[in-house]
């Protein structure tokens, strides 16, 4: 086939234009690094990973939530500092620990306040949660509206079973770096020591402390049964898990992305609550098979000891009437 000079020049120009055209660059995903202090197989971590996948699918890959469990991004104190500075975008944290920054977050940690997890969810999904969320926003962070379920906390020891408040007198035990946890066990006569979750197993193994308190799911996933023999099912405190986003980062996201992220995490919270409660119900049997011995103490005696110590009156004054009334609208009178 013969190509004329005109056809040759036209083709050369077209080819040169194609080579000179700027390459098409795919839009980069918005990466959200989510730090957690719990193991990979905990229902909260499993739920966070599931939420991340749903968000990535719903945004066609525009938002990539990357979950870092088991203190990979540092302990709670370190992660909280990085979240506030914007060095990381998102964090999940127990409200008892978070209360060092937002004191009202500890409202649902009041000792023996809730008989069931459903009561706690009702309080936090309702007026009490509204007040706490407003305080979180004032601290420069944005909370997902529905709190996740870490569950009721139980006491474990390596030396003896805890059956009465007197069994705690002088007992050296770990509590998280949480003002209300420290206050609760001091009020019960124990000698609590604050230790971050990342250091807990070693502290128990080396007898820096002889006991601790955690939900059964944490006890099992953190393998604390390997260094603790006894468990008292005290249900002394319910702990929720706030999913928090750095405030300026959140405000900078497009509105449609914010809606997808918030809706997905809040829907996943309902699934996580059910999954955590289901797992919790099965864990006494699992841990018993692994050698842990369980007791069911009289909880009224522990609550009476807290009342006598002034624990409830003290925390009622700290939280103030609006928040305390919101709590008691669900629990009934406490102080």
Image (cartoon, rainbow, N blue to C red):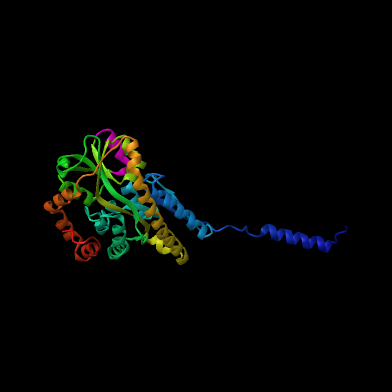
Q: Which residues are magenta?
A: 196-207
Residue plotted at (74% across, 61% down):
13
Q: Is residue 218 above or below residue 252?
A: above
Q: Pinpoint residue 27: horizontal percent, then vertical percent.
A: 55, 58
Which residue appears farthest toward the left when viewing the image?
A: 308
Q: Quadrant of the N terminus?
A: bottom right
Residue 83 vs residue 102: left or right? right
Is residue 206 at all visible to an observer of this figure?
yes
Main SS, magenta residues = helix
Q: Choose between 328 and 282: the one closer to the eye.
A: 282
Residue plotted at (12% across, 51% down):
309
Residue plotted at (16% across, 44% down):
165
Q: Is residue 211 above or below residue 50?
A: above
Assess whether residue 199 is covered by the magenta stretch: yes
Is residue 37 at all visible to an observer of this figure?
no
Q: Quadrant of residue 7?
A: bottom right
Q: Quadrant of residue 216?
A: top left
Q: Quadrant of residue 222?
A: top left
Q: Pinpoint residue 81: horizontal percent, then vertical percent.
A: 33, 51
Assess whether residue 308 is covered by the magenta stretch: no
Q: Pinpoint residue 11: horizontal percent, then vertical percent.
A: 77, 60
Residue 67 vs residue 295: left or right? right
Residue 126 vs residue 172: left or right? right
Which residue appears farthest toward the right when viewing the image?
A: 2
């Amino acid at each position: 086939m013969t190509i004329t000079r005109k056809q040759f020049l036209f083709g050369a120009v077209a080819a040169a234009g194609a080579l000179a055209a700027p390459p098409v660059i795919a839009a980069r995903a918005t990466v959200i690094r989510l730090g957690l202090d719990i193991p990979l197989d905990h229902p909260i971590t499993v739920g966070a990973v599931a939420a991340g996948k749903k968000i990535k699918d719903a945004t066609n890959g525009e938002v990539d939530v990357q979950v870092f469990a088991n203190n990979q991004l540092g302990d709670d104190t370190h992660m909280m500092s990085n979240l506030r500075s914007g060095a990381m975008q998102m964090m999940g944290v127990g409200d008892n620990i978070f209360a060092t920054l937002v004191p009202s977050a500890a409202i649902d940690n009041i000792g023996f306040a809730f008989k069931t997890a459903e009561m706690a969810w009702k309080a936090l999904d309702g007026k009490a949660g509204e007040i706490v969320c407003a305080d979180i926003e004032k601290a420069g962070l944005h909370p997902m509206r529905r709190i996740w379920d870490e569950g009721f906390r139980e006491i474990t020891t390596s030396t003896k079973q805890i059956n009465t408040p007197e069994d705690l007198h002088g007992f050296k035990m770990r509590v998280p770096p949480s003002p209300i946890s420290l206050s609760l066990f001091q009020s019960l006569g124990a000698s609590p020591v604050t230790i971050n979750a990342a250091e807990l197993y070693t502290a128990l193994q080396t007898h820096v402390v002889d006991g601790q308190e955690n939900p059964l799911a944490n006890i099992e996933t953190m393998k604390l049964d390997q260094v603790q023999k006894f468990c008292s099912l005290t249900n002394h405190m319910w702990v929720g898990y706030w999913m928090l986003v750095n405030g300026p980062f959140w405000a900078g996201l497009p509105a449609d992305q914010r809606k997808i992220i918030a809706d997905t995490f809040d829907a996943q919270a309902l699934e996580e609550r059910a999954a955590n409660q289901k797992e919790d119900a099965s864990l006494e049997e699992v841990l018993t098979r692994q050698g842990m011995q369980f007791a069911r103490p009289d909880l009224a005696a522990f609550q009476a000891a807290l009342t006598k110590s002034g624990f409830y009156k003290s925390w009622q004054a700290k939280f103030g009437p609006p928040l305390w009334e919101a709590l008691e609208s669900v629990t009934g009178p406490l102080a």
